[in-house]
Image (cartoon, rainbow, N blue to C red):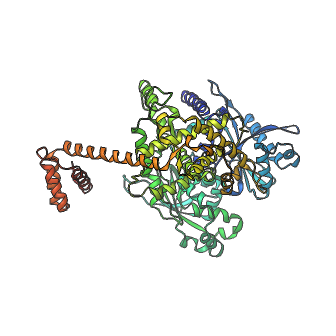
Amino acid sequence: MIELIEFHRELIADIQGDADVQGLITTEAFFEKVTDLLTETGEIDEANRAYYEGSFGRYALKVDGYAGDPVENANILTLIICDFAVGNEVRAVNKADVESFQKKLYRFLEASLNANFRNSLEESSNGFSLAQMISVRWQSIEKIKFIIATNASFNAYSDAEPLEPADDKPISLSVWDLKRLKQFVEQGQARADLVINFADDFGGSVPLLKASAGSNTLESYLAVIPGWQLANIYDKWGPRLLEANVRSFLQARGKVNKGIRDTIKDEPHMFFAYNNGLSATADSIELEKTEHGLALSHATNLQIVNGGQTTASLHAARKLFEQQLQEVHVQMKLTIVPNLLSEQVVPRISEYANSQNKVNAADFFANHPFHVRVEELSRKLLAPAGEFGYRETKWFYERARGQYADERARRTIAERKKFDAEFPKNQFFTKTDLAKIENTFSCLPYIVSLGAQKNFTAFAKNIGETWGKSGESFDELWFKRLIAKVVLFRAMEKLVSNADWYQGGYRANIVTFGIAKVVYDLSHIDKVIDFDLIWKNQTLPVPLSIALLEAGKIAQEVITAPPKGIQNASEWAKKETCWKWLLEKTTEYMLKPDKICISKELATSRAKDAKRSAELDQSVNAEIEVFNLGAELWRSALTWGTSKDLLSPKEKGILETCIAIPKKLPSAKQCAVALITLNKLKEMGFEV
């Protein structure tokens, strides 16, 4: 209980901090925090805040948001309600409280189908926008999910619990209470606790063969699972079955694979022969012995790391080819990966396994060199104190979930104070923050508006292409300018929240569109924002803030006035046409642009100067390192490399020069080659 109280205290502090930094009320900050977590778990793919609270007839209605257009989310409508309160004690909610919340969601759903209710709402309001979307999409909606998110403790457990259907459409309820949020956050990875009971809930245990051998190998099995059984499991758990990186990949390419579909339809008996099958992991499993051998009865945290397209296609075939699905069987390679190893092992399984749509590990995994580089720079570079600071600090990049909390937790109280001073809480950002900000400044606000996971997929693909062999363009100056973008983005969030013209709602869309508008307008006169000045001051110059506010106001006007046929502003913001409409708008800040920008030529010149300076520092550091390693080390390297016939004549000559240290000193270029040669020998087995 003490740990839950501490988590509750820290969660409230985080929410209040986020609200202050972003200019939100605490309930808005709680919605954003929780939906970010739900996106990572796979519970939802995206989230849009659409707060409405009122009544219709004698019934109370409430909704805080939804998980995107059902048509773009497997025809599933997800409605979210939040229950957040600030207090020292951990509140408790019981079954009656939960029933009250779900009834408010149900009544809103029901009222949305009533024209009188929709007509009673202000057309520019979030409530009208959501109700109108539900009404328009009702015929295509196949499934409804209610999610209750609360910072209270629920005395029961509710996950995909079936409720009374609405118009023959199944409804399920999931409650994310304080205990469940704590459990997920402390896992340190994007996987939620998920237990599948094959034996009791999905038609029977799955026969399997043990495939692992030896004490040093991970436990692994081969299984054959009926297609209908896999489809039914996916119907309940949905994208939460798919390992997070694969889930992101499929969102960008979510159409049912035609080859898989045709096989199910025309040759279901050949599916096993034609299909590559699944690669899956689980934290743990329960087996039972049958007369035919071992069978899988339970799996905890089952994750499909390859074969997501197969799984989704089988699910899609449940209605189209129900009879044929009975003949389909799918092979599954199942590896038991303990929770502590999952961050390292699961991505590699996904990377190396075969699937219909190969997932590019360079695009998705947190251990890609790009993310490692950003992490290294964030731990090394000191940010200026700025106009209002009193000491230099650092910006903490969280490459993998939980890093920031873990770094604090493993320190003593005194060490934490030092850590907090070095890495202030408001100077912490994540991979999805980075993707959102970079795509905004790349003038892709309609991509950013797709939601955190889809936006990250698009960003990751671009990084995979631009990284190259060494990612040399992602240097210290790039990082400083990245932080300047973070400062600007967060300042814009606060500017919009406090603006007298802000109507409430769609803030995330307004922020990304407004910033992109300024960037785009300046680029057309060969100008750029002075990120170096923002880095130096750690704040925005006043003229730039004024320009951003003007762009944000125009962005709001465009976003909240979609064309005929599009009723929902959030969905309108996801379309490139919305962005093109905004580009056509003229602005006053472009009458005197020099107040808010510098020339591209100056920005490029500064980058070249920084690169030359970095190269000089690197050269000096190489000379120092070669000298410090000493003549004896270089003599050993030369002897070992020569005996293995691994050295070229040039390399031998340079190592012979190094042997003469300190009487003779190699040049800067020779030092660089000497260090490269030493690393090569180390890779071949030379031990220093």
Residue nearest the viewer, comparing 510 with 450: 510
Q: Residue at x 20, y 50 (%)?
A: 667
| 608 relative position to 110: left or right | left
Place of residue 616 in the rendered image (x, y in percent of width and height, measured from the top left): 30, 46
Q: Is residue 563 visible?
A: yes
Is residue 424 left or right of 112 when viewed as pictured? left
* Residue nearest the observer in this picture, 328 or 366: 366
Residue 400: image location, x then y, percent: 48, 44
Q: Is residue 66 above or below residue 269?
A: above
Residue 506 percent coordinates (x, y): 69, 44
Residue 300 appears anywhere in the view: no
Q: Give x and y (percent) for residue 124.
A: 78, 44
Report the label total: 0
Residue 507 higher or lower than 292, as above or below: above
Q: Relative to the observer, which residue lies in front, 47 or 583? A: 583
545 above or below 587? above
Classify residue 596 as left or right of residue 628: right
211 lies left or right of 641: right
